[in-house]
Amino acid sequence: MRSLHRSATSALFLGLALSAVGGTLGAQQGSGRPNVFFDCDGRNCNSQYYRTEITWVNWVNDQAVSDVHVIMASLTTGAGGREYQLDFIGRGAQSAYVDRVRFQTLPTDTDREELDGLAHTLGLGMARFANSAGYRDLVHLTAPDPESSGQGSRRVVSSQEVDDPWNLWVIRLNGSGNIDGEETRKTERLNGSFNVSRVTPAWKMNYNGNLNYSRQEFDLDDGTFRDARTDWGFTPLVVYSIADHWSIGFQGQVARMTRVNQNFRAELTPAVEFSVFPYEQATRRSLTAFYKIGPAYRDYIQETVYGELDETRWEESIEVEFSQRQTWGDAGVTVVGSHFLHDFERNNLSLRGDIDFRVVRGFSVNARANIAWVNDQIYLSAQGTTDEEALLRLQQRGTDFNYGMSVGFSVQFGSIFNNVVNNRFRGTGEGGFGGGGFGGGGRN
């Protein structure tokens, strides 16, 4: 069992196990149990699992009829696990109720262990709400024997409690291979990557590397098109926390990127970031300004449209990002501007945003959009791009702008108190045939 990391009550709740008691209530019955609206967008948002494990509340599908609104968000920990923050916000007669619990997973945890721990933490938070709101006889708490070697003895420990031979360093290696094709097409891909990181309250160090090989063949009317390329990269990041709202550091890169005509690229950019809100609040709201400046060297595969085979140019950029997750939904806006110091007309300005907003009970709208004005493609090849390279997006083409947008809505009506979970035929979806017709999909 992992620690709940609640400052005032962690000692009380550590090692507690929940079990449901009381009689079974009807699916439409709203009295006797609190109505819970679960709000999550990210990792482990498995509402079906939590509904199965926690049966002593009414899981409702509409925020407007809930007694408590639960928002779950998470951040990556230095060891590679995640810290989940669960905010419990009362509604209606309980609108003054506000509570927060935290839960940390280990990087070696299985999906089941993570879900079990989150269900336990979620249940404890809802038990606290039920007790505060006057609900009685819903659950009871039992503490396992602390001397036993069972689950009750497992928890996250701090670096001060152990002799860590790795000194907080974490190393990850990944690799994959893929081959697919048909009579007139064949594709081969090999990918590998590594990550080395160390995170402390004052320092954050992250070193990423990747190697990608791809080979493609297509039979066309006028012959066979073949393309083979190898890309690689190494990206270091070092950050130092100088205050609750300020951080300094640098980013670097050494890479080969064939799509943008760069046989070799090297850069080093010092950076500074300011957060309007304390960094600890980043799971619910964030407003940051990030600035960096530095030189970048490029060795080109083909001569560029400006007649260069290699060059070193200084660049600077600033990024302002705002995001928040509230009971009405979530939204975010990011603005990024950059330019070359040798020529301010070679610049790039991009804007992207998203919103998911609950308009009224059972009805929500969402929108995603991005647009960029591009005038900094100094790497473009003077030879241009073939039709095959353009269609397969193997080579970057010149452009003045790019954009994208999506708009959607969601309407739900009918039962809002249905707590029944049915796991049968999960892989088939809930409507229509898959893209492959009969037999076109597989079960998970």
Image (spheres, rainbow, N blue to C red):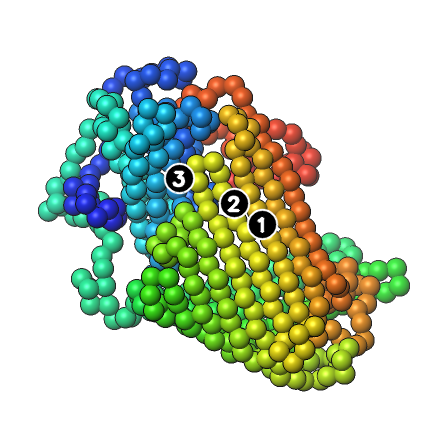
Compared across the picture, whether 398 is left or right of 413 comes to right
- Of 247 and 51, which appears nearest the observer? 247
Compared across the picture, whether 220 is left or right of 303 comes to right
Q: Are marks 2 and 1 in contact (CB under 8 Å)?
A: yes
Residue, disc 2? 331
Q: Does residue 281 sit above or below 139 in this rendering?
A: below
Q: Real-space Cα distance between discs 2 and 1? A: 7 Å
Residue, disc 1? 353
Badge 2 density bin: few <14, some 14–19, many ≥20, Cα 10 Å: some
Q: What element carries label 1?
A: strand
Residue, disc 3? 71
Number of callouts? 3
- Of 60 and 46, which appears nearest the observer? 60
Disc 2 or 1, which lies upstream in sequence?
2
Badge 3 density bin: few <14, some 14–19, many ≥20, Cα 10 Å: many
Question: Residue 111 location, x and y as percent?
Answer: 39, 46
Q: Select label 3 or label 1 by which is in front.
A: 1
The kind of residue tagged 3 is: Ile
Disc 3 or 1, which lies upstream in sequence?
3
Q: Select label 3 or label 2 by which is in front.
A: 2
Residue drawn at the location 19% of the way across and 32% of the way down: 141
Q: Quadrant of residue 159?
A: bottom left
Compared across the picture, whether 255 is left or right of 34 comes to right
Q: Real-space Cα distance between discs 3 and 1? A: 21 Å
